[in-house]
Image (spheres, helix red, strand yellow):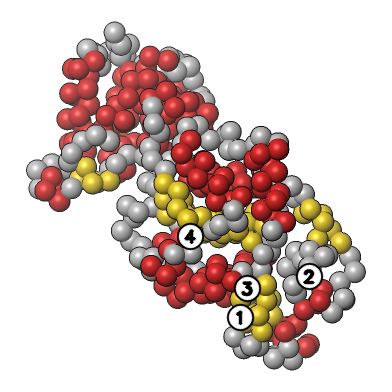
Amino acid sequence: MELQEQLKKAFIEKGKGFDEIIGQDAAKQQVKSALIAGRHILIVGPPGIGKTTLAKNVSLLLPEIEVNDCEYHCSPKRPVCPTCRAGQTKKKKKISGAQRFVRVQGSPDLTAEDLIGDIDPARAIKHGPLSIEAFTPGKIFKANNGVLFFDELNRAPEKLQNALLQALQERAVTIGSYDVDLEANFIFIATMNPEDTSTEPLSDVLLDRFDVAYMDYPETLENEERIVEERSQHFAEFPADVKRLAVLFVRLLRESDRLEKLPSVRASIGLYERAQTNAIVKGRQKVTWKDVQDVMVSVLSHRIKLKPSAQYLQTPQELVQEKLKEFMQQQGISGESEQGEVP
């Protein structure tokens, strides 16, 4: 409850609320509402749209707190680990919002022990293999009194997903070899890319533990331009009209009915950065449309995937070149010279 109150205070009394995220107002509202309610939340959307950035911004909302100097970040008022319960932890320490935000990267190699914890051989020798003191806590317990962020949840193997069920429902974990329940007061935030096919399906029983917030590509051309401007490296002058055309092309490419996988915002950022370095390699400090045109295939072709019905007719590289030619004709752009004339 204390964690919920802290987030409620940040959102309502202090007026904070993911201001660093451009657009995505509906998703931000859903995340705020879920956090205040103490709900676990799954952020779903295609790659490169800010799911991870949105989740990481929660750490900016968490205030610094005082906890016991233990591996579980026990609250002095409500200790959960055996050492603190026994009154053996005397020291206190302060942890920042960033330290209260614990991240796990989804991977097929991830194990339940990474999340829950495991027996430490050195401690087992000292305290005995069946002593709770021999247990080394995993990420779930390190996130006690904070937020556990799981990036790409559907990349986790089924066994690990099952290990999460009790923790998400009861905010406690039964340590099997000890037959002991340890509490973990945390909010769980996860992300998922539904377009990723090399993943494990999430079971209905796991999904039932979450509320879901959906994110999509930037709502407007202006929003995507701002994201590109703020998230990119800057090497050379990039005229506003050329930048707008580069971002517009990516957005129009997403509308192609031949694509199964669409170019993300990272594609727009890639065009912005590579066009600049392309100009520098050619000895110029100002980007032209020709600089953008020359890196289109390199930046975009591997970030898209054709539908099976279209794969027999052309390659991704050929589609990018075809769409680029159509786009330049529609916009009245001549791309033959280094001036890259833009009307």
Please give the residue where the numbered disc 1 appears in the rendered image.
174
Q: Which residue is drawn at 52% across and 70% down?
A: 164
Name the amino acid type tagged 3: Ala
Please give the residue where the numbered disc 2 appears in the rendered image.
79
Q: Is 21 or 340 nearer to us in this picture?
A: 21
Q: Residue at x 70, y 43 (%)?
A: 9
Q: Where is residue 319 in the image (x, y as percent from the top left)?
A: 18, 36
- Per the image, label 1 sits on a secondary structure element best described as strand
Q: How far apart are marks 2 and 4 (CA)?
A: 26 Å
Name the amino acid type tagged 4: Phe
Q: In this view, does 37 lie to the left or right of 79?
A: left
Where residue 84 sits, quadrant-wise, is bottom right
- Per the image, label 3 sits on a secondary structure element best described as strand
Q: How far apart are marks 1 and 4 (CA)?
A: 21 Å
Q: Is 257 or 9 nearer to us in this picture?
A: 9
Name the amino acid type tagged 1: Thr
Tell me if mark 2 has few (under 14), some (14-19) or many (20+) residues whose alpha carbon lies within 10 angstroms of its own. Answer: many
Q: Is 143 or 168 nearer to us in this picture?
A: 168
Q: Earlier in the sequence, mark 1 or mark 4?
A: 1
Q: Earlier in the sequence, mark 3 or mark 4?
A: 3
Name the amino acid type tagged 2: Pro
Q: Earlier in the sequence, mark 2 or mark 1?
A: 2
- Per the image, label 2 sits on a secondary structure element best described as loop
Contact (Cβ within 8 Å) of mark 3 with mark 1: yes
Contact (Cβ within 8 Å) of mark 2 with mark 3: no
Q: Where is residue 29 in the image (x, y as percent from the top left)?
A: 52, 41
The residue mark sitting in front, 1 or 4, is 4
Please give the residue where the numbered disc 4 appears in the rendered image.
210
Q: Which of marks 2 and 4 is nearer the N terminus?
A: 2
Q: In this view, does 147 lie above or below 185?
A: above
Please give the residue where the numbered disc 3 appears in the rendered image.
172
Q: Is residue 69 visible?
A: no
